[in-house]
Image (cartoon, rainbow, N blue to C red):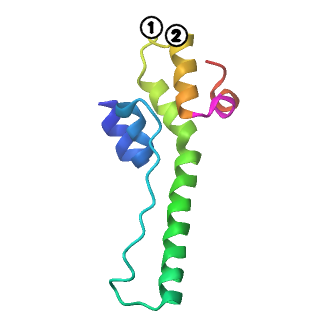
Amino acid sequence: MLSNVASKKYGNLGKLIDMEEYYIPCLEFSDYDAMRLSEAQAERLEFEELKEHSKKLTKMEDDRPKLYGLIMQHMSVESKDEKLLKNLTMKIGIGRRIQRNYGKP
């Protein structure tokens, strides 16, 4: 099934197939107060969590054209109609990048 392949290859980005909308994971900080860390230590750890979350979001954005290519590989010729592809590219939010890499839908 395409959604399983997409989720396995692209993680949270692959959820687009099942959810039919772009999923953005929330950033949740650990409870550093309960760990009895100093304020400076807690801020440093929160900053590291923020950087890691930012990396994940950047990777998701970079993988959008790859997900589009995977979807295109699994579509039948009959289902590759212009309206469907335009809707898909708008949902993923990568219109121009896709056109540059794969041609116009």
Depth check, mark 1 against mark 2: the one in front is 2
Q: Which numbered circle lies on residue 54?
A: none
Hey, what amino acid is under mark 1? Glu
- Please provide percent x and percent y for residue 62: 59, 47
> Is residue 94 located in the magenta-colored stretch of the structure?
yes
Q: Main SS type for the magenta part?
A: helix
Residue at point 36%, 90% (across, down) = 36
* x and y, in percent, of residue 61 in the image: 57, 46
Q: In which quadrant of the rendered view does residue 100 lie?
A: top right
Compared to residue 97, the image places residue 88 above or below, namely above
Q: Which residues are magenta?
A: 93-98
User: Which residue is disc 1 drawn over?
Assistant: 78
Q: Nearer the viewer, residue 8 or 42?
A: 42
Q: Residue at the spot x=57%, y=37% of the render?
A: 65
The answer to whether residue 43 is above or below residue 89 is below
* Residue 10 horizontal/vertical position (percent): 43, 46
The residue type indicated by label 2 comes to Asp
Residues 25 and 32: in front is: 32
Taking the spot 46% from the left edge, 11% from the top edge, the residue there is 77
Residue 81 is labelled as 2
Screen quadrant of the N terminus: top left
Q: Are marks 1 and 2 in contact (CB under 8 Å)?
A: yes
Q: Could you tell me which secondary element the residue under label 1 belongs to? A: loop
25 in relation to 76, above or below:
below
Q: Quadrant of the C terminus?
A: top right
- What kind of element bears circle 2? loop
